[in-house]
């Protein structure tokens, strides 16, 4: 993220930009390693914060979330 924004604000900024450019859906890829946060899908609190912010910005544009493989059902349900 930029020095002045949190990671969820960066995701929201990009979501807004792609919607403005004509995207009909926003996909959040939490399974790809993030240089600063590792595998995002393994941090349920951060995932929730990012999704909440992106959905707020996206309005009526659908938002999908791509996750990786969870080690067990409990971990999956936490996300």
Image (cartoon, rainbow, N blue to C red):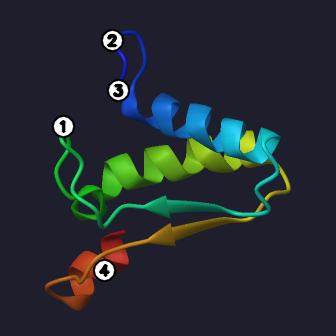
Q: Gap in Å between the C-alphas at discs 4 and 3?
A: 26 Å
Q: Position of residue 45 (x, y in %)?
A: 34, 50
Q: From the viewer's side, name the closer residue of 30 and 49.
A: 30
Q: Which residue is mark 1?
A: 36
Taking 67 as reference, is 20 above or below it?
Answer: above
Taking 10 as reference, is 63 above or below it?
Answer: below
Q: Quadrant of the C terminus?
A: bottom left
Q: Is residue 17 left or right of residue 47?
A: right
Q: Which residue is mark 2?
A: 3
Which residue of the protein is positioned furthest toward the top in this rendering?
A: 4
Report which quarter residue 43 is drawn in.
bottom left
Q: Position of residue 38 (x, y in %)?
A: 16, 51
- Residue drawn at point x = 50 percent, y = 59 percent: 28
Q: Position of residue 18 (x, y in %)?
A: 69, 45
- Residue drawn at point x = 35 percent, y = 26 percent: 1
- Residue drawn at point x = 25 percent, y = 89 percent: 73
Q: Which mark is residue 1?
A: 3
Q: Secondary structure at mark 3?
A: loop
Q: Secondary structure at mark 4?
A: helix
Of labels 4 and 2, earlier in sequence is 2
Crowding around mark 2 (Cα neighbors within 10 Å: few <14, some 14 to 19, many 20+) is few
Q: Is residue 33 left or right of residue 12?
A: left
């Amino acid at each position: 993220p930029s020095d002045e924004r949190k990671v969820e604000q960066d995701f929201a900024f990009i979501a807004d930009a792609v919607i403005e450019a004509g995207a009909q859906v926003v996909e959040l890829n939490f399974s790809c390693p993030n240089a600063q946060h590792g595998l995002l899908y393994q941090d349920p609190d951060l995932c929730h914060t990012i999704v909440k912010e992106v959905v707020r910005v996206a309005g009526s544009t659908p938002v999908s979330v791509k996750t990786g493989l969870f080690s067990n059902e409990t971990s999956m349900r936490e996300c």
